[in-house]
Amino acid sequence: MAKSSDKTYFDLVFEVTKKVPVGRITTYGAIADYLALGSSRMVGWALNHSVMMDGVPAHRVVNRKGELSGRHHFPTPFFMQQMLESEGVKVENDKVVDFEKHFWHPSALDDE
């Protein structure tokens, strides 16, 4: 991914998050590694500010264990799960079922 000096860290995180395909999930750490800018916590912090922004599917980003750790930043604690399940991603006990099956790494963008 080309990093432009005129883009903020938030812009870069949002740009990658917008490319997570419907029905797939990624992790805060995968985005942080791909951008080579900071940590997974910084990605989470950025996404906490995007929850209600149009076009940033923050519900598709989970922690490294597949847990919906950001669920409390949505309008309701169940909103993130409802969004994922509407896309075909099953969630049980606030954790993605078949995590590996649904996982998408941002490095796939380099193949486009």
Image: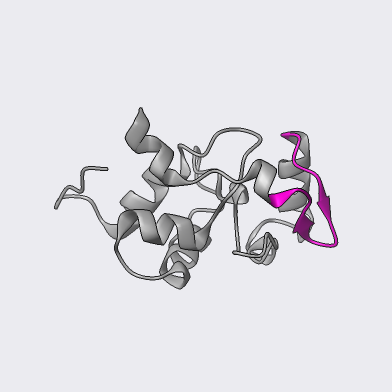
- From the top left corner, tell me how far across and down residue 81 is, in percent: 76, 50
Color encoding of the figure: one colour
Q: What percent of the width, then of the height, locates residue 51?
A: 56, 53
- Nearest the viewer among 107 and 2 is 107
User: Is residue 54 in sight in this rendering?
Assistant: yes
Chief SS of the magenta region: loop
Where is 104 relative to 95, above or below?
Answer: above
Q: Is residue 23 left or right of residue 108?
A: right
Could you tell me which quadrant the C terminus lies in?
A: top left
Residue 97 within the magenta-colored segment of the rendering: yes
Front in this rendered view, residue 19 or 83: 19
Q: Residue at x 76, y 61 (%)?
A: 77
Residue bounds of the magenta highlight: 87-99
The quarter of the picture where the N terminus appears is top left
| Image location of residue 15, percent across then percent down | 37, 43
Residue at screen point 55% across, 34% down = 21
